[in-house]
Image (cartoon, coloured by chain):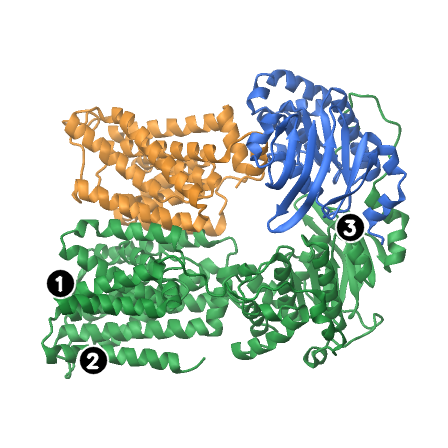
Chain colours: A orange, B green, C blue
Amino acid sequence: MIFVQSALTGVLVGGLYALMAIGLSLTWGMLRVINLAHFGLILLSGYLTYHLTTNAGVDPLLTVVATVPVMFVIGALIQWGFQHFKVSELSSLLVSFGLLIMGNQIISNVWSADFRRMTSDVNPYATGSLTLGPLVFPMPTLIASVAAAGLVLCIHYVLARTFVGRALRAFGEDPAIASAFGIDHERLGLLLAGAAGATAAVAGTLFALGGSLTPSTAFEWFGVVFAVVILGGIGNVLGTLLAGALVGGIAGVMTIAWSPVAAPVVVYGLVVLALVFRPNGLLPRRGGHG
Amino acid sequence: MTWRGPAGIGVVILALGALPWVREAFDLPIFLLAFGTLVLSWTALATSWNILSGYSGYFSFGQGGFYGVGVYTTAVLTGRHDWNFLATVPLAGLLAAALGLVVGLIAFRLRALRGEVFALLTLAVPFIVAPIARLNPSIDGGQGITVPVPDIPEPLNGFQDLSYLLCLAIAGIAVVVAYVAQRSRLGWALFAIRDAEPVAEGLGVPTFRSKMVAIAITAFVAGMAGSVAAIQVGYVTVEGTFNLQVPLFVIVMSVLGGRLHWLGPAVGALVIVTLRDRLATSGFEGFSLIVLGGILVLFVLLAPEGLVPRMRRRLVPVLVAFVAVGAALWLTRLREDPVDWLAFGLLAAAVVAFLPGIRRRGAEAALEPVGPEVETDHDAAAAPPALADEGAPTTSPTDKPIVVVTDVTKDFGGLRALDGISLIVHPGELLGLVGPNGSGKTTLVNLLSGQFRPTSGTITVGGEDIGGLPPHRIAHVGVARTYQIPRPFASMTVRDNVAMAIMFGRSPTDLEAARAAAEEHLALVGLAELADALPGEINLHERQLLEMARALATRPRVLLLDEALAGLNPVEVDNAVGVVRRIRASGLAIVLVEHLLRVVNQLATRIVVLDQGRVLADGDPATVMADPEVVRAYLGRRPSGALPPAPATDGGAGA
Amino acid sequence: MLELRGVDVFYGEAQALFGLDLDVGDGEIVCIVGPNGAGKTTLVQAVAGMLPVRAGSVRIGDTDVAGRPAHRVCHSGVATVPEGRRIFPGMSVADNLALGAYRRDARSARDESLAWVHELFPRLRERAGQLAGSLSGGEQQMLAIGRALMARPRLLLMDEPSLGLAPVIVDGVFDVIGEINRSGVSVLLVEQNVERALEIASRGYVLSEGRISLAGTGPELLANEELRRTVLGIA
């Protein structure tokens, strides 16, 4: 039973992983840049949520009003830099790594390296849980997962049904022809990067609901997020959600079955296996995407 | 390769090695030794990293994993099993190298793993190794390991001396290996991989082997560096060992110093260590990583070649600035701390290196147009004897065929690109392969050169079945090709591009001999004056000639020219035609894929026309081009009936 | 409708078009023929703005669009049916068509355009939800043309629409081109299938090695021996 519990909790947490991964996945697939600074945006958003909640008494969930615009702008600015300097995929990896390190240090300078966690007197979601028979789901995890999964589904809807979404997909498939029909590369790229930043903002806020923050937390996310991105298929929204659930579930079970420390081994092992055997993701490849 | 280089490095190492006793004699602060140790150990880590990642372009985030294996090897063996410390050092290197080979086996076998994906794969290494160490009680178990201080051998005065000399030794090994590698076949192979890996394979460069050797070296040195770090730290923990500091620093140091030069990472290490030290002493410790990250961003975007190439171009001013500023601070006592002299000296040197106004080396190379009249005296000259001896004598087309294509089909998913093609090429023939767009010409060339395998049917070259051979093996069988869009090795000169083909071709030679032999091929295509230019400095036509020269240098029996005349103006086309004629005179078989039909008509002894994946005609130019089927294929078909009234849709099943 | 004067286009550093002069009148079908590698596709891409024009002017209507990027050129009323069709394979037929109407002026008339496209190509209505990548060659060609029509162009650029299609389907394609032209759209047609193209066009140009070597009306060119020689490369 304990395995079932940890598996299911893990699946829920996987929803949040999927939200963390979706921004990275879409910019990688459509803009051909790997933006490691994305992790920094998630982290910064988490810290901002902590800060506003603890020092200004704002409801944690409402902090997105502040974090989303900020991360949107930063995300778009980074993309503008990539476009302006015409960076290659590998260079984008290096440059964003440098930005991540810088951002990390700044966060550490401002908030110190101590663990930061919103206490229950300022965080109304910190305690409480949902009990379903023998299974117990902590409130922060539940809220985070439901919100995250919901947001990912919204993104899927936007891509599939709206005008802008259609333009993005066309741009991802054949940028030259898309532009021949009126789609402006650069503006769309900025929009997409900004939106990715916005998803990072929400992910950070949701993480802060139940998690502890320290500057090195951003690096702890590398493994799970890349596992989700690659298993889900770069640029594939629904795939990312499923991969999130899968990775989360497996990590959850491994934590109990083996050790909490073992999770990275399993997760990175999955990344390696995915890269070797299914570099296009677990789901079958749809015509020509990538 | 002369021995001056390694000898010079050896002198420097010996001089540095004297430091412990010099310090003792002049009673200099022990801090100098500590500082030196730090610079040397980072030099070792960064230089060894660069041999794989800088030279070959395969960016590795895994250096921390190899380093960590080294740390723990020594920690466990000396801390738990009482081994002699010095014995653990090479063992640490070997274990790390073993890990490197495992990573390489997984990563390098798969073509799909491009540069950035490889980087992510290697990121997994420390993240997998660390928890294993943490969880396994016979390794770490979560408690950390106390490493005993080793016995200090007689001539040394203390622990710091031992530490320093060990780091010097390892750094010395790393730098010498990097120096030797850069100038050896391995180095050239790695640079070629960095510039254009598929092309390198096609020339016969053993890419897999080279990368494996590189990763083994990288890991070996990193492991040894980790081994020494274990005794310096004294108490080893998983968190302290496996963090992102090592990969970050080696990347920044190499990017800053220069990734294509053996001294680059060492210079980068010196600058970064000095910088961090100064930031710490002036109370700006918290800005250290911000500065490092900023340097990485700036250099990748604005100065990707790094410091050392720039410094080399202005060596004297840079050295003068360095010495002058440092000495000035020392003599005027403006600054007391020697590290300050070093810091400001480096700063001055860097500023001088980056001053605007310098042109790239080689920019002034003669770029005269290569006109047809320059080479007329070569026309009459006999084919260079070496080529004739190589088994490609001038033959008549009735001799035994060199290429036999039998009933070949090629499918791409549901699309049939080639449908039952059969043809023969004889030595000495110039076969023109033509056909409308989409007829399968390029697919056929790709099959002949090994990019693809036939779905069915056989292709033999000189009697040997090439279906299923990897491109570098096919190169050794004697097939060479040019690419429609030239892909030279951008970081090598024109001559070296051709020399590469000779070095790795069917009869491997060393660099000097290869360079000499390259001259004849350059002369044949008319590029002799541009031998020292870089590909980026010559025009499209000249790059296409370079493609041809490089292909010829592999001494092929069959040369595939894939749209070698694309994008040329009429004068250039005529020149190229002359070159192809000269090439033909040396007796090999040439397959010319070309759109410019007037050129094909001028040059070819035989024409094969493809249409929708099938051979439509095969014979001498006059007959073929008059064939009504061929005319119809090019000019179009008459309508199949009366025009149905509008609005129309397609009348039948899909194509 | 379309006027090119002195147009130079480079592909990388190779010059592909040399001082080209060309006209397409209102309501005309003008075809460009010539040997492969002559620069026909380069010409289409340059007019559409997908390749930069290094010198000369490209007037669509009365606006000079030379030097503008593709997403701005299309606002002048140009739509492209590219070589090899280049529909968006991972998107449905309906989405491909909807995308065609992306530019502002076309968006409001989307439903009307879609009705017309369905009338011309009933097959596309049947296959609306299907992934474009799974269509046959002929169906993809229809989709590419339909997508371009959704943009409500004044000038339609067509690059080798008959490429890789069976003769019967090619008939259908050329009929549709005629129909489109009759509705008032000017057409610049690049074709390998010289005879079909010259039959449908009012005028034609022969492009060879980046320059116009012959020009004339359809019938004139069809009868011209020199055309035959140019295309076959016979000296």
Residue type at mark 3 is Gly
Of the 4 image quadrants, the one containing the C terminus of chain B is top right
Image location of residue C39, percent across then percent down = 70, 44
Picture layout, residue C94 above or below residue B556: above
Residue at 27% across / 43% down in the picture?
A103
Select label 2 or label 1 by which is in front: 1
Residue type at mark 2 is Ala
Select label 1 or label 3 by which is in front: 1
The disc, 2 or 3, on the residue closer to the chain's N-terminal end is 2
Pointer 2 residue: B18
Image location of residue C184, percent across then percent down = 73, 20
Quadrant of residue B444 within the rendered picture? bottom right
Answer with left or right where residue B345 lies relative to residue A19. Answer: left
Image location of residue B109, percent across then percent down = 50, 60
- In-front residue for pair B598/C17: C17
Select label 2 or label 3 by which is in front: 2
Instruction: Say yes or no: labels 2 and 1 on the same chain.
Output: yes
**Mark 1 chain:** B
Residue C223 visible in the current orientation? yes
Image location of residue B606, percent across then percent down = 83, 61
**Mark 2 chain:** B
Picture layout, residue B28 above or below residue C178: below
**Mark 3 chain:** B
